[in-house]
Image: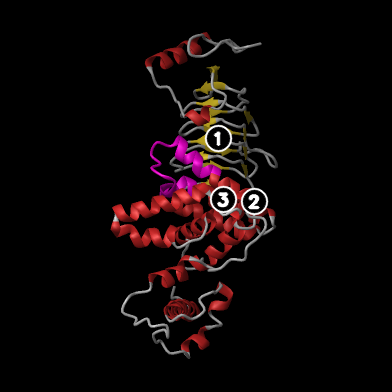
Amino acid sequence: MKSSPFFFYHHLYSSIGSLLLVMACINGENCDFSCSSSLSSLPMIVSRNFSARDDGETGDEFPFERVFPVYARGTLNPVADPVLLDFTNSGYDPIWVSIREEAKLEAEEEPVLSSFLYASILSHDCLEQALSFVLANRLQNSTLLATQLMDIFCNVMVHDRGIQSSIRLDVQAFKDRDPACLSYSSAILHLKGYLALQAYRVAHKLWKQGRKLLALALQSRVSEVFGIDIHPAARIGKGILLDHGTGVVIGETAVIGDRVSILHGVTLGGTGKETGDRHPKIGDGALLGACVTILGNIRIGAGAMVAAGSLVLKDVPSRSMVAGNPAKLIGFVDEQDPSLTMERDATREFFQNVAVAYRETIPNGSLVSGSCREKRH
């Protein structure tokens, strides 16, 4: 089917508008724009001459400092809001400071990435702006423009204290628990588990505001781009690690506590026979191994460990370890939050304990000794 002339001219007009906005910025024009105002300002921009500034610039050097922000930020000077975090208001954000320092060093070490690092991190004033830019450029398509997405993400993040806290606690979780996470900056630039989680947080806020169609549109794009499907109505705590993230599915009524670590291929789904509240509830500090499937409105206790490949259909006690298909109780863990250490013991002793547990488990759930403590009454 042939493309409609309307859409052809719409995209042509939008492209010309973006180019003229960049040209205007080079010439010192007011670059502060929004998606709604950019097209209406075209006639004014077209009527102006493209000439050098009066302050002595010759135009021989490309003005990176003034051009990059045009496409790096939906709004160059967002209005300060009292809802910003105290550390942002005080002028010191240790994680953002670390991210900027890392980006500067990385630009020196790998000059070919310098423009990418400048546009993604160094041209921004805060973590919220930088993260909004990265998400917008990763999720954009021909109908969801990067400038539109940038405005959506940034507007939600800078007005929500909870999201501001979560994006920092999440990036700290990735840095602390994922050995493959080289730096804070690498998490916000490259790790799709982190990016998908932050896009969910914005979609969740939009869902609660009643903007469900937009929230679902973001969910769809995140699923297409990152391969991670999180329903915007799900409730997820802070300090979350989505390690790798590929294939993670989290259903509409799922609830995940704080400091939870989730590996790739995890499904928090329904049984297909229920309506209403039908998805799992995951306690604080739980660790869900790779390709774990948890079905139904059941509870995984705080600090519990679910071994890779397990199918969980019943409640799991706090600080216990389950494994198998279907999952069976094989012991208790000593750590309060196994999600923080990410220790998934694969030693010979561990597998011997698992084998003994399967042989010796009786209906009331008696357990083996060794690395797993006996069940406490």
> Magenta region's main secondary structure?
helix
Where 84 sits versus 69, above or below?
A: above
Q: Residues within 10 Å of mark 1 (few under 14, many from 20)?
A: many
Disc 3: which residue = 200
Circle 3: residue type:
Tyr
Q: Quick one: label 1 or label 2, which is nearer the N terminus?
A: 2
Which stretch did the figure color magenta?
169-195
Residue depicted at x 53% and y 68%: 76
Circle 1: residue type:
Val
| Residue 318 lies in quadrant | top right
Label total for image: 3
Disc 1: which residue = 260
Screen quadrant of the N terminus: bottom left
> How far from the left and from the top, in percent, is residue 91?
56, 54
> How far from the left and from the top, in percent, is residue 68?
42, 68
In the rendered image, residue 329 lying in the magenta stretch gets the answer: no
Which circle marks residue 161 in the picture?
2
Q: Measure the alpha-carbon separation of dots 1 and 2.
A: 21 Å
Q: Secondary structure at mark 2?
A: helix
